[in-house]
Image (cartoon, rainbow, N blue to C red):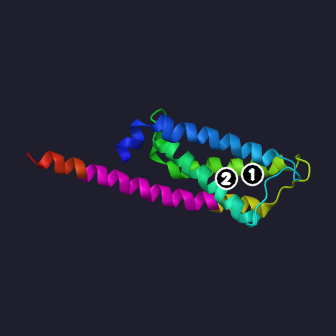
Amino acid sequence: MYSYLWSHKKYLIHIPLIIYWIILFILTSLPSGMAITTDISDKVNHFGAYGLLSVFLYLNLHFQNKLKLFSKYPGIFTLLIASTYGLLDEIHQMFVPGRSAEFLDWVADFSGSLIAVLITGYIIKKFKQNEIEKSKLKVGTF
């Protein structure tokens, strides 16, 4: 799975991040009367939205090879980028009619990002370990 993600990163990782981030920005830019509402708590929505953003962002940072520091520490950079974007998005919403900036929304954004980073990091580590173990088995058998 790890090598499959690596070889298909453009379609499975890069493009989904771009599309999702655009959708997220559009949804947070809608005035309150046009915004999509659910019966789920606003904080849960923030948690989930930034959790999914962080999964895509973590994968992008991990599976890129231009900036080695980002691929070496994707979790830290994902948290920095996602939490900064969450803060900027809260500030941006102060200028959207009917919306407001809330500190607890940012806390939910950060929390979703943190949990997503921990889970995604664990899963990627397991995928990578399985790939290494499979390659050792192939090399060891003739």
- Residue at the top extreme, as displayed: 66
Q: Is residue 29 left or right of residue 67?
A: right
Label 1, on which residue?
A: 87
Magenta stretch? Answer: 112-133
Is 22 part of what is drawn in magenta?
no
Labels 2 & 1 near each other (Cβ < 8 A): yes
Image location of residue 6, percent across then percent down: 40, 39
Kindly state the secondary structure of the residue where label 2 is placed.
helix
Q: Is residue 17 left or right of residue 84?
A: left
Name which residue lies at 69% across and 40% down.
22
Q: Amino acid at mark 1?
A: Leu
Is 115 part of what is drawn in magenta?
yes
Image location of residue 121, percent across then percent down: 46, 55
Name which residue lies at 73% across and 58% down.
106
Q: Nearer the viewer, residue 28 or 78?
A: 28
- Graded by Cα atoms within 10 Å as few (under 14), some (14 to 19) or many (20 or more), the crowding at tag 1 reads many
Name which residue lies at 63% across and 47% down.
81
Label 2, on which residue?
A: 83
- Graded by Cα atoms within 10 Å as few (under 14), some (14 to 19) or many (20 or more), the crowding at tag 2 reads many
Image location of residue 134, percent across then percent down: 24, 51
Mark number, residue 21: none
Q: How many marks?
A: 2
* Residue at mark 2 to residue at mark 1: CA–CA distance: 6 Å
Q: Amino acid at mark 2?
A: Ser
Image location of residue 90, percent across then percent down: 79, 52
Kindly state the secondary structure of the residue where label 1 is placed.
helix
Q: Main secondary structure of the magenta part?
A: helix
